Image (cartoon, helix red, strand yellow):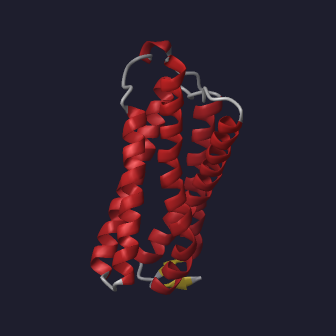
Amino acid sequence: MEQAGISLRPVVGAIIVVSGLAVSFLLWLLYVHHASADFAGRWMFLPALNALLNGLCAITLCVGLYFIKHHNREAHRTSMLLAFAFSSVFLVSYIVNHALHGDTIFPGHGLVRTLYLSILASHVILSVVALPMVLTTFFFSLTGRFAMHRRIARVTFPIWLYVSITGVVVFVFLKAFAYQARY
């Protein structure tokens, strides 16, 4: 499992370990950690920032797809690096938001709650899957293993795009129904 002087086994192992640690930390943050009341009402812009970053990631992913379909590799690379940057900043912002504010409960009921929870569940499950796939896809690209990059990118792209779009959809659901609950 060696190509271009870099053995794949330790890199894939590192990607699995990093992904596992990130997911474990997020699960701890969401289900064990309790947010302090000291931060209630502060930094309330973070959910909107997270939605914006997810939206920007989705746009840059689509732009990157457009560029690679038109054989503009340099613009594709730039777009994908931007998508990765937006996702990385999102992850930091998401962690900070949940560390400060805890989890947000969806106030809707009935069919709309079922729809929201279905979207949220698919978003969460696929985000766990997307992390190691994105890292692996980037590794293959950055090390010049373009055949492997193309093969995994065909699966990574739709999952990453879905996670980015549903991140925005979850935010819209929460905001729309929080607004309705107030009035």
Asked whether 150 or 119 is in front, the reply is 119
User: Is the residue 112 above or below the residue 166 in the image?
Assistant: above
- In the picture, which quadrant includes the N terminus? bottom right
* Residue found at x 40% / y 67%: 62
Residue 60 pos. (x, y %): 36, 63
Q: Judge whether residue 24 can be spotted in this image.
A: yes
The quadrant holding residue 146 is: bottom left
Asked whether 40 or 132 is in front, the reply is 40
Horizontal side of residue 174 vs 83, given as left or right: right
User: Is the residue 1 above or below the residue 121 in the image?
Assistant: below
User: Is the residue 64 above or below the residue 183 in the image?
Assistant: below
Asked whether 61 or 135 is in front, the reply is 61
* Residue extending farthest front: 183
Residue 113 pos. (x, y %): 67, 35
Number of numbered labels in the structure image: 0
Q: Judge whether residue 14 can be spotted in this image.
A: no
* Residue extending farthest top: 38
Residue 183 pos. (x, y %): 49, 17
User: Is the residue 162 above or below the residue 7 in the image?
Assistant: above
Horizontal side of residue 126 vs 85, given as left or right: right
* Residue found at x 39% / y 33%: 46
Residue 138 pos. (x, y %): 45, 69
* Residue found at x 47% / y 46%: 168
Asked whether 148 or 14 is in front, the reply is 148
The quadrant holding residue 61 is: bottom left
* Residue found at x 48% / y 54%: 164
